[in-house]
Amino acid sequence: MGRKWSNIKLKKAAADQARCQNYTKVLREVTMAVKRSGPEIESNFALKLALLKAKQNNVPKDNVEKAIKKGMNEGGENYEEITYEGYGVEGVAVFVEAATDNPTRTVANVRSYFNKVGGALGKEGCLQFVFERKAIFTLEKNNLDADELTLELIDFGAEDIEEEDGFLTIKAPVDAYGALHQKLEEMNLTVAESGLERLPLNMKEVGSKEAFDKTMKLIDLLEGDDDVQKVYHNLEYNEEFAES
């Protein structure tokens, strides 16, 4: 009985921590969207998406309103967006997007994560030929046909639509984000997720389970940091290493 209750408590604590951390990241996304493009939802697609995420994660409305005010510089911390580029074990490329009110703290944390697994932070721009930035939209497939949807959206910037695990993923240039978002809304299609993503142009295989585990640990450490919003990498997933 004692052990079972202990396990339940541990699981609940882990879930609470994950939810809390998710709140932090979503609210920071709201703040940064307002800071970039203002508080008007109709003209700020990033804010619209961030508010949708807040709703999906059951973030309290009071917290969301405070995050919007922070973006308008009405008190609170002054966040800035910073990116970090580096290499993990065996040259796996890792690109980090952060939003922080203390860049000194954030870079020290990020550097320590790379060092912990034998990787290293690189100079700004060192990964410019490893990732490409694209607008990405993910929809539930339902009754949609990928070819028909491509024809419908090609004039609005859609370059490619991939189908996997019951979802359709639309890829487009960064500057087509707004037009595509609007078109999908006009078509009454529910966007499960959208944003500007960094896609790897080439994947990197590692030669051992140890190297694979260290890379996964680095990604976990980075994603677990409150200041880190997104982590991109070009590690080739190895099912054998992951399962053993």
Image (spheres, rainbow, N blue to C red):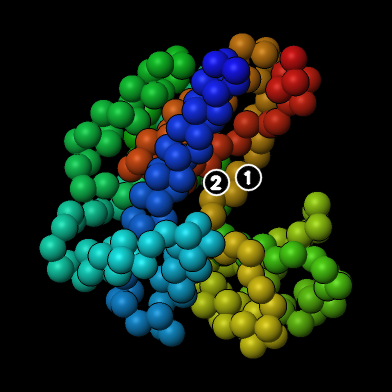
Question: Residue drawn 49% across and 28% down?
Answer: 9
Task: Look at the numbered disc 2 and give the secondary structure of its residue.
Answer: strand
Q: Quadrant of the C terminus?
A: top right
What's the residue type where badge 2 is placed?
Phe
Position of 126 with respect to 207 (left or right) is: left
Q: Quadrant of the N terminus?
A: top right
Q: Residues within 10 Å of mark 1 (few under 14, many from 20)?
A: few
Question: Residue drawn 50% across and 57% down?
Answer: 57
Above or below, comparing residue 219 to residue 167 in the picture: above
Q: Are marks 1 and 2 in contact (CB under 8 Å)?
A: yes
Question: Residue drawn 30% across and 76% down?
Answer: 38
Task: Look at the numbered disc 1 and give the secondary structure of its residue.
Answer: loop
Q: Position of residue 139 (x, y in %)?
A: 70, 66
User: Mark 1 — residue?
Assistant: 201
Task: Find the distance from the CA under tag 1 to the CA under tag 2.
Answer: 5 Å
Q: Quadrant of residue 166?
A: bottom right
Q: Kindly identify which numbered label has been placed on residue 55.
A: none
State the residue lying farthest toward the front: 1
State the residue lying farthest toward the left: 75
User: Mark 2 — residue?
Assistant: 131
What's the residue type where badge 1 is placed?
Leu
